[in-house]
Image (cartoon, coloured by chain):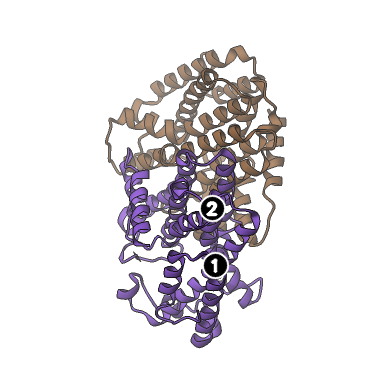
Chain colours: A purple, B brown
Amino acid sequence: MKELIELVDKHLDEYLPVCYPEDIFKAMKYTLMLPGKRLRPVMCLETARILGGDMTNVMPAACAIEMLHVQSLIHDDLPCMDNDDFRRGKPSNHKVFGEANAVLAGDALLTFAPQLIIEKSTGLNPEQILKILHEYTKFAGAYGLIAGQVVDIESEGGKFVKSPEETLDFIHLNKTAVLFRLAVRIGAIAANADEKTIEEFDNFAKKFGLAFQIYDDIMDEISTFEELGKTTGKDKNSGKLTYVSLYGLEEAENKFRNLIKECYGIIEKYHSKVFEEILKKLSDRIGSDK
Amino acid sequence: MKELIELVDKHLDEYLPVCYPEDIFKAMKYTLMLPGKRLRPVMCLETARILGGDMTNVMPAACAIEMLHVQSLIHDDLPCMDNDDFRRGKPSNHKVFGEANAVLAGDALLTFAPQLIIEKSTGLNPEQILKILHEYTKFAGAYGLIAGQVVDIESEGGKFVKSPEETLDFIHLNKTAVLFRLAVRIGAIAANADEKTIEEFDNFAKKFGLAFQIYDDIMDEISTFEELGKTTGKDKNSGKLTYVSLYGLEEAENKFRNLIKECYGIIEKYHSKVFEEILKKLSDRIGSDK
């Protein structure tokens, strides 16, 4: 796991050299290179590996997913969105580079990610690259990540088209789970996996993504700024719809444990130390039903 | 020309049906469907046609370029960027849908554009589609459009890495000419043109793009809100670097006429009524040296 994170960090840095005009590349790299768990690229690489693919072939696409993730964080932190001054324990992008550059840095990451896939995926054939780009565009946009963001904003304004339960699941299947789904799907495509296997991993990623979000909601309730590196208690104070606010802490923890158990059930036949470590770490504080 | 515009409008509308969550699709469509000259898609389609390609094959990519253009307008109008309340005579996107949705609508167009190319370009082969996507990502991001935006913002703050003349050309070759370049390059690729022809059209688009920007700078100086459908005199009042502020009105007009003349020189052998109409319309008020 640690080696994979280092490998991802090294490639993220190499893929994006600072050119003229330097300000935009510096803004892109600032949030991208903050130390992180690199969960999405690591899951992408590990999926490719356990399905018999070559990890190096999928490295550009794995890093592209992290770029997409970071783009969503940069725009999410903007004053007109979540208005967060800190990210991963450091001042957020717009606090350092200004709002205009933060908007543009997000835009630039959003187009650089597929450019990277096209230019550097030398070990994949054109059909695989096109399929990966198709997944990327579908999951990154209004049919995926952004749908989740929009419904999240709407629900904060008290606007619900669906029930609160359905709305909450919709938000996080799209806002949170979508990038884990994209990660394992791309890993599986790079390994030439069949449709059934892709769907199996997709199912894993949906459950993992929901568990991850419930964990996040629980942590927002019970953690401190020092532990998380970002402002806490915001959800509660803003009356935001979360798994904790909707179901209560105990029921949210039960949901979390069940999802983790289901994740173990799907993934265990692959004997992946990396996936086991990811699940174990996520459930360290809350406990799990493995 | 009028028929091509109508064809583009029809396809833009069809390609993007309003789904759940409706707010984001409505925000995307609002600025996209404001009546416009559709210069970029029209130039893309016409380039494909005069080089012997099938226009219908390149329609999705032509519309994708308009989406990219509209994305840049939506983000450009944001309070943290140019802070423009009007666009094409109507309230700008963030005035209607709020800032958060305007940021997300731009992001969504930026990923929907390549998704559209992948899903609907049924008349092109995978190599052509990949080449088109590569051009799209290169020209849309930090190596193209966004580089122009960033240097534009920097120069407003009085920060110049290069000379004012070089800076101004860099801004507009990237901010303005880049989408015309992308349009003719994609049209040529869809028609299977050779590299020399692609470069010839690219050269045309660079000159056209600069002429277009000089025209814009001159109009900002001499027109009214009613004529342009957007706030005028802003450049002058903000002390912004423009062709008029740098070279004076007369010299800017000379530059414009010379560029238009060069454009005619490159394109005339193709006997394209559409390109001639575009050049004629652009030079109506200032006059040209055809």
Q: Position of residue A58 (x, y in %)?
A: 47, 48
Residue B172 x %, y %: 42, 32
Q: Position of residue A108 (x, y in %)?
A: 43, 46
SS class of the residue under badge 2?
helix
Residue at horizontal 39 percent and vertical 82 percent from the top: A222
Who comes first in sequence, dot 1 or dot 2?
2
Q: Is residue B269 above or below residue B120?
A: above
Q: From mark 1 to mark 2, how far is it between C-alphas?
A: 20 Å
Residue in the image at 32% along x and 45% along y: A23
Q: Which residue is mark 1?
A: A269
Element type where label 1 sits in the image:
helix
What amino acid type should be assigned to the residue bearing mark 2?
Ile
Foreground: disc 1 or disc 2: 1
| Residue with the mark numbered 2 | A186
Task: Read off the chain for label 1.
Answer: A
Q: Residues within 10 Å of mark 1 (few under 14, many from 20)?
A: few
Report whether A89 appears left or right of A193: left
Front residue of A67/B247: it is A67
Position of A88 with respect to A191 (left or right) is left
To the question of a shared chain for discs 1 and 2, the answer is yes
